[in-house]
Image (spheres, rainbow, N blue to C red):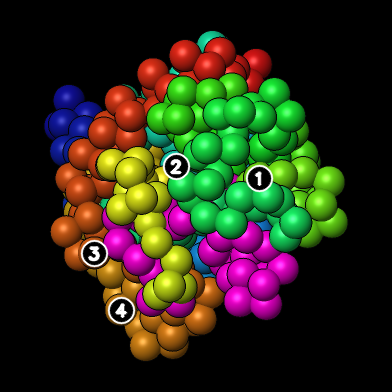
Amino acid sequence: MKFRKSLLTGLCLIAATTLLGNKSAMAADPYPNKPVTLVVPFSAGGPTDAVARLIAIPMGKELGQTVIVENTVGAGGTIAATRVARSNPDGYMIFIHHMGMATAPALYKKLPFDPMKDFEYIGQVVDVPMVLLGRKNFPPNNFKELEAYIKVNKEKVTLANAGPGAVSQLCGLLFMSREGVELTTVPYKGTGPALTDLLGGQVDLLCDQTTQTIPYIKDGLVKTYGVTTPKRLPALPNVPTLDEQGLKGFEVRVWHGMYVSKGTPPAVLAKINKALNVALNDPEVKARLAESNIEIAPPAKRTPSGLKDHLEAEINKWGPVIRKAGAYAD
């Protein structure tokens, strides 16, 4: 009996020592202790991918681990979003997505995730302004002439976009909704070919990001009817906003946010948020973004609550527009 008691006592001491050792190891080995994956829902070389790769290096330096950018493409970003939503809530899989996170609930009848329930929020990242363009030989020379022209010729006017769910499509839907007209929409597999056809005169109108259109605007290869931000852009000071030309409250930005799966510990969220803000305050990052006419989100929006509130507002904004147009992606 004494031997058994001694054995049990010894086993208990070993178990207790092991448990304490494991706890100590955990405490001494906090997040992150291995590389972190930053999931991009679009192909390499696109605007979202470019932003992700730019901030990944300074984020990694702040975290003390490599941040690996991984492209998971398909279904307008929903495949990547689903993957992250179902990942372990440990902060090792981070997700960056543009405003498609807000439009997906209306665009897809069967969405395998809920943007407001299946994620924790890190913060907004950047905003990319857009501009409404026309082909060089399109008759209207300014926005007022454009409004008059499309009311008379709406059946003939073509409006290009980058396909279902693309921001160019959403911008076009909002424009048609505000103008009370239905134009002939022409979907493309990306804004690249859509812009090529606009430059070639095959389509009349296109709403596109400033990152790739400003050189053509400055060279006079397209007509410019207005930017989609509340204020004029420093890069295009002579181009009025659509808001100041009568479309009050018209605002479309390709905003980006950063997320992780639901249940990620608050301490981990805080570390990722700090790394994001350190990256966005990096002088080289700021200079590179400015060169591409990409605006860094203001500090108040680079927070979990800032992103959550903005996402909810954008869902409420775009849902009615998409459902009214019947522009579903599935």
**Quadrant (top left, top right, bottom left, bottom right) of the N terminus:** top left
Q: Amino acid at mark 3?
A: Pro
Number of numbered discs present? 4
Q: Which residue is mark 2?
A: 99
Q: Residue 307: horizontal and vertical position, in percent? A: 27, 46
Crowding near the residue tagged with mark 1, few <14, some 14–19, many ≥20 C-alpha atoms within 10 Å:
many
Q: Is residue 189 visible?
A: yes
Crowding near the residue tagged with mark 4, few <14, some 14–19, many ≥20 C-alpha atoms within 10 Å:
few
Query: Which is closer to the viewer, label 2 or label 4?
Result: 2
Instruction: Specify the segment rendered in magenta.
Output: 207-235
Distance (Cα) linking label 1 and label 3:
31 Å
Q: Residue 89 versus residue 137: which sits nearer the camera?
A: 137
Question: Quick check: 125 left or right of 141?
Answer: left
Tell me if label 3 and label 4 are in contact, CB under 8 Å: no
Q: Amino acid at mark 1?
A: Leu
Reading the chain from its start, which is encountered first: label 3 or label 4?
4
